[in-house]
């Protein structure tokens, strides 16, 4: 039994004529008639009563019609679900706080592109709360967020630790603070500070580090990438996780560098999050695995400070 046989029966019943059904289905009338007869032989009942005035459903056919309609509706739901799954698999959306963009995110996207050449990846920079809300609501498939060691993971979220680093001061090599082996909180109060906006983990960390005191002058910005560019242009220093600085093109070019923070033992974790779900599209699953695999490679490679 084939689905189109049931569709043909439904069309004949709806239109009341083999000829009109054949026209709508773009089949020859003999071909349609033969298909219907094959189904009748398979089921062992006559589904149609054929008259000069047209074809109508037989009594046996009327009894089976609800079952035929039910099967066709189930097939339509299956096709719709498959179409939605196809759509999702052709687009993976990743929310990120822009941490470890070059050492982690870029290599993973490059590898993913080779394995999924027709799947689009949309990378959206956002704050942690926006990313987690997007994961819950289905706007994001994956999220890259920073946690301070000890932060709670939101309920209903699957969270995987990718990188474990420490806060560092990101500065230009010609900054007065670059001569120090470690930078203290008092040092940060004396220079222009490029802070992350409220809502970023590093904003919370710096506020705690400085005990709520305001530096001599400060900027605020969204995300590590803009912060590093502002440092490179000599506007000030910023505080970021070491994995956001080491290996960055600006750091490799000698435009920025970093120093540890004196006496600090706080750890910053880069977490990969996704909503707990029974079914995950293959593309999103493969991208998740790519992040985990790349993070293991970075964990083996030592991070240094110039």
Image (cartoon, helix red, strand yellow):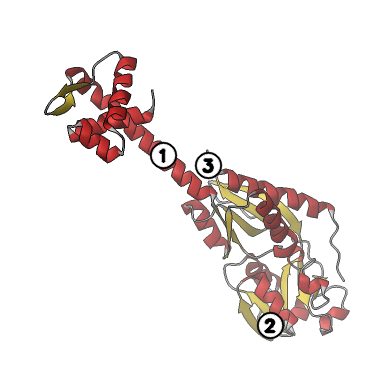
C-alpha span from label 2 to label 1: 60 Å
Query: What residue does disc 3 label?
Result: 277
From what the image shows, is residue 250 above or below residue 65? below
In the depicted view, which residue is nearer to us: 161 or 186?
161
Query: What residue does disc 2 label?
Result: 215
In the depicted view, which residue is nearer to us: 162 or 102?
102
Which residue is the extreme one toward the top?
44
Check whether the beta carbons of the residues at disc 1 and disc 3 lie within 8 A of each other.
no
**How many C-alpha atoms fall within 10 Å of the one at disc 1: few (<14), some, or many (≥20)?**
few
Instruction: Identify the image quadrant of the N terminus.
Output: top left
From what the image shows, is residue 174 above or below residue 98? below
Q: Which callout, 2 or 1, points at the residue further toward the start of the chain?
A: 1
C-alpha span from label 1 to label 3: 21 Å
Q: Position of residue 172 (x, y in %)?
A: 80, 80
Q: Which callout, 1 or 3, points at the residue further toward the start of the chain?
A: 1
> Is residue 211 shown left or right of residue 168?
left
Q: In which quarter of the image is residue 195?
A: bottom right
- The residue at the point 45 percent across, 46 percent down is 84
- Identify the secondary structure beneath mark 3: loop
Dot in front, 2 or 3: 3
Q: Position of residue 176 (x, y in %)?
A: 83, 84
Dot in front, 2 or 1: 1
- Identify the secondary structure beneath mark 2: loop
Dot in front, 1 or 3: 1
Q: Position of residue 28 (x, y in %)?
A: 29, 33
Query: What residue does disc 1 label?
Result: 79
- The residue at the point 71 percent across, 71 percent down is 209
Check whether the beta carbons of the residues at disc 2 and disc 1 lie within 8 A of each other.
no
């Amino acid at each position: 039994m084939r689905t189109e046989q049931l569709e043909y029966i439904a069309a004949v019943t709806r239109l009341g004529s083999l000829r009109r059904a054949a026209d709508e289905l773009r089949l020859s009338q003999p071909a349609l008639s033969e298909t219907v007869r094959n189904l009748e032989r398979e089921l062992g009942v006559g589904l149609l009563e054929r008259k000069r005035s047209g074809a109508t459903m037989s009594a046996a056919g009327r009894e089976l019609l609800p079952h035929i309609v039910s099967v066709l509706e189930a097939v339509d739901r299956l096709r719709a679900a498959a179409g939605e799954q196809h759509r999702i698999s052709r687009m993976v959306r990743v929310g990120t706080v822009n941490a470890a963009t070059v050492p982690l995110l870029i290599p993973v996207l490059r590898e993913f592109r080779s394995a999924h050449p027709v799947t689009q990846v949309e990378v959206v920079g956002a704050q942690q709360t926006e990313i987690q809300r997007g994961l819950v609501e289905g706007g994001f498939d994956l999220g890259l967020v920073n946690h301070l060691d000890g932060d709670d993971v939101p309920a209903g979220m699957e969270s995987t630790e990718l990188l474990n680093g420490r806060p560092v001061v990101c500065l230009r090599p010609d900054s007065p603070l670059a001569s120090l082996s470690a930078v203290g909180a008092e040092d940060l109060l004396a220079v222009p500070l490029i802070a992350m906006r409220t809502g970023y983990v590093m904003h919370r960390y710096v506020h705690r580090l400085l005990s709520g005191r305001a530096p001599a002058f400060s900027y605020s910005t969204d995300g590590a990438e803009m912060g590093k560019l502002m440092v490179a242009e000599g506007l000030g220093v910023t505080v970021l996780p070491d994995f956001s600085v080491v290996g960055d093109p600006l750091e490799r070019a000698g435009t920025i560098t970093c120093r540890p923070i004196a006496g600090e033992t706080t750890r910053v974790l880069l977490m990969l999050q996704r909503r707990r779900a029974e079914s995950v599209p293959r593309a999103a699953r493969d991208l998740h695995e790519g992040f985990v695999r790349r993070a293991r490679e970075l964990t083996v490679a030592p991070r240094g400070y110039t």
